[in-house]
Image: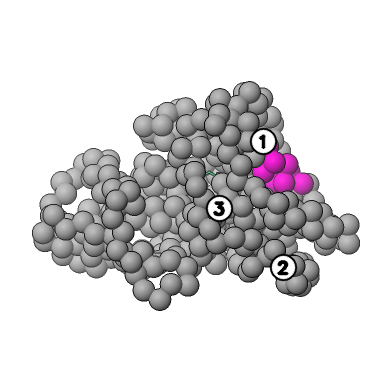
Amino acid sequence: MKEQLIKVKSPANIAFIKYWGQTDSENVLPANDSFSMNLSGCYTELEMELVVDINVKELYIKDYKAEDYKKNEGDALQKVVTFYDRAAEYLQVKTDVGFRVKAANSFPKKAGIASSASFFSALAAAFSTAFEKKLETKQLSVLARLSGSGSASRSVPDGYVFWHRGISSESSFAESIAPPDYWDIVDLVALVTLDEKKVSSVDGHRCAQTSPYFADRQRQLAKRTPLIVNKFRKKDFEGFGTMVEEEAVSLHSIMMTQKPPLYYWSGMTLDVMRETATLRKKGIEAYCTTDAGENVHIITRRIYEEKVKDHFKNMNFVKEILTNYPCEGVRVL
Ligand code: DP6
């Protein structure tokens, strides 16, 4: 490897069918397939400087709206170092240089907007570039998954993405099922809080199977997943949105009943969900989905975008709205 500066940009993604629970935590194999859309307004811009001194392993992060980068040590750095070694193993190369990683987020991290997906998919692309390995999208999605943040695999391909759970490391990959311009979906993230969540998804996945409803959810997903893809293919927005919302509630019913329980929702999450239902009564097609966090993704279409924004503009529980359109996956710049 030679000294160089690698620049990458990668989006976060929002899952319409959620990944929750694993069959193999070491290889990050999910219990079920999942389906998502890349988010144009929520991304990580990452720079990786390769340095001759192998002992240099540094991580700097610029948070949403922060002026400067802050040096991260401890857990966050450890995850990057572990992934560096794992990437070298996967790509069958030797790590003979050190690195300095600088990552800037365009959105709040650890707040239910998949910041680890954008970060680790960017890092996967940076590592494979550093190791001078040109990977196909499929292989890069496998590498991103091995970071530990499984949803990072879905930030690799373009537009609308399906992650096949697979039965082995190589068969658990993500692929694009439609380009960004396939459908005029908009994801408006209603930020009710900028606080970081207290329990990470990684810890949550481990306990998912302790929910008495987990097996039932897997059975439901066997039907819901092909059905939602079918609504997507037919561009049936009402059918699609209804199922997206149903799926989010199913995810959180597992979270709330696993042991120990995870209550990611707050009263403000429910306020946004109720208000979105009110909008539907007025003929504005909008549906909610939430990940491991309090903030709500409102899934709507371009024609309703301004109306939804206007409605929430004056609600004091919504601090800010982040606008996202479907976009391409990770790119080395
Ligand atoms: C609820 O293990 O990929 O968002 O490490 O936080 O990115 P992070 O999470 P990961 O689990 C994602 C869980 C989810 C659902 C989803 O995105 O599919």
Task: State which tag comes first along the sequence, 3 or 2.
Answer: 3
| 249 falls in the magenta region | yes
Find the distance from the CA under tag 1 to the CA under tag 3: 16 Å
User: Residue 31: percent from the left, percent from the top?
Assistant: 52, 30
Residue 9 sits above or below residue 268 on the image:
below
Q: Is residue 288 visible?
A: no
- Sequence-first tag of 2 and 1: 1
* Residue visible at 58% across and 50% down in the picture: 293
Q: Which residue is mark 1?
A: 253
What amino acid is labelled 1 in the image? Ser
Badge 3 element: loop
The image position of residue 43, as x and y in percent, is 48, 63
Inspect the magenta stretch and tell me whether residue 174 lies in it: no
Say which amino acid is labelled 2.
Answer: Asn
Distance from Cα at disc 3 to Cα at disc 2: 20 Å
Q: Quadrant of residue 263?
A: top right
